[in-house]
Image: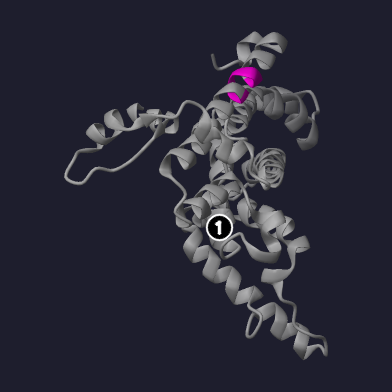
Amino acid sequence: MFGLVIAFKNYKIAGGRSFIYNVIHSDWSGFKNFEFLIKSNDLFVILRNTILYNLAFIVLGMIFSVGLAIMISLLHSKRKSKVYQTLMFFPYFMSWVVAAYFLDAFLNQDNGLVNSMLRDGGGEGIQWYMKAGVWPAILIFMYLWKSTGYNMVIYLSSISGIDTTLYEAAVMDGANKKQQVRYITLPCLKNVIIMMFILNVGKVFYSDFGLFFQLSQGASGSIFNTTATIDTFVYNAIQSSTPIGMTSAATFFQSVACCITILVANAIVKKIDADSAII
């Protein structure tokens, strides 16, 4: 955590000196480094994209993960259940670099599968990596494809811990599967869903760098307005030799903003239902 002080210093490297020496002997700059982000012409775009994408990830990720967990828990065949879990969990272990190659195999302008099918059908190929309007859907789809399996396993493990006598009593009372899910499964999952929601809200100012940078091949050019986030902005700034103090200030802002959002989300939950809060 000591390195956070770089955000408030005009950090300079002295040859042959240690990191701590350089930090201590660099001049204080106060809040001037934060002007790099605040006065940027792209601040609105990267903030909007970072927040809106994360809100979409939270809502859709929760719906798909809970839904799939419930569907798999209702399967009678344990073998099929394990197969489906493995198939949906597998993408989580794949890096975004590998996923980017798979995506390029579909969207490549010259020999991508999608453009090949369009040309075979008498149409023209589309330059997907220059078409800004399609990237929100692509990024959201790829995020769900990669992360839903992991989140689903969390909910599925919670479902397996629900007392089976509750379902047996419901069957005795004539409840069908839909009613069992509504009145037993979902209420029992409430605390886990709220906990996952609070933790995800804490990352609303953070974006998965690999997702946005690797898949879009740089998050720049004509698709900048729909793919750029705070993390890709900071990376591109580092590549353009922006002083490290300024880029550190941008990431420091992210950390503080994420801390505030998770505390606010927890406080709201605590007001509504104190037992569901995590703090």
The percent coordinates of residue 243 (x first, y second) are 43, 45
Please name the amino acid that badge 1 sits on: Phe
The percent coordinates of residue 3 (x first, y second) are 35, 31
- Tell me the quarter of the image containing the C terminus: top right
Question: Which residue is the site of mark 1?
Answer: 213
Residue most extreme to the left: 16
Q: Is residue 221 magenta?
A: no
> Compared to 18, does 8 lie above or below?
above
Q: Nearer the viewer, residue 82 or 132?
A: 132
> Compared to 143, does 171 lie above or below?
above
Coloring applied to the structure: one colour
**Who's the residue at 70% across and 9% down the image?**
271
- Tell me the quarter of the image containing the N terminus: top left
The percent coordinates of residue 235 (x first, y second) are 49, 51
> Compared to 173, does 43 lie above or below?
below
Q: Nearer the viewer, residue 199 or 11?
A: 11
Left or right? Give the position of 175 relative to 145: right
Q: Nearer the viewer, residue 30 or 266?
A: 30
> Compared to 110, does 182 lie above or below?
above
Res. 177 visible in picture:
yes
Res. 78 visible in picture:
no
**Who's the residue at 52% across and 57% down the image?**
91
> Mark 1: which secondary structure?
helix
The percent coordinates of residue 149 (x first, y second) are 57, 48
| Quarter location, residue 211 | bottom right
Residue interval drawn in magenta:
261-265
**Who's the residue at 67% across and 70% down the image?**
129
**Who's the residue at 72% across and 12% down the image?**
272
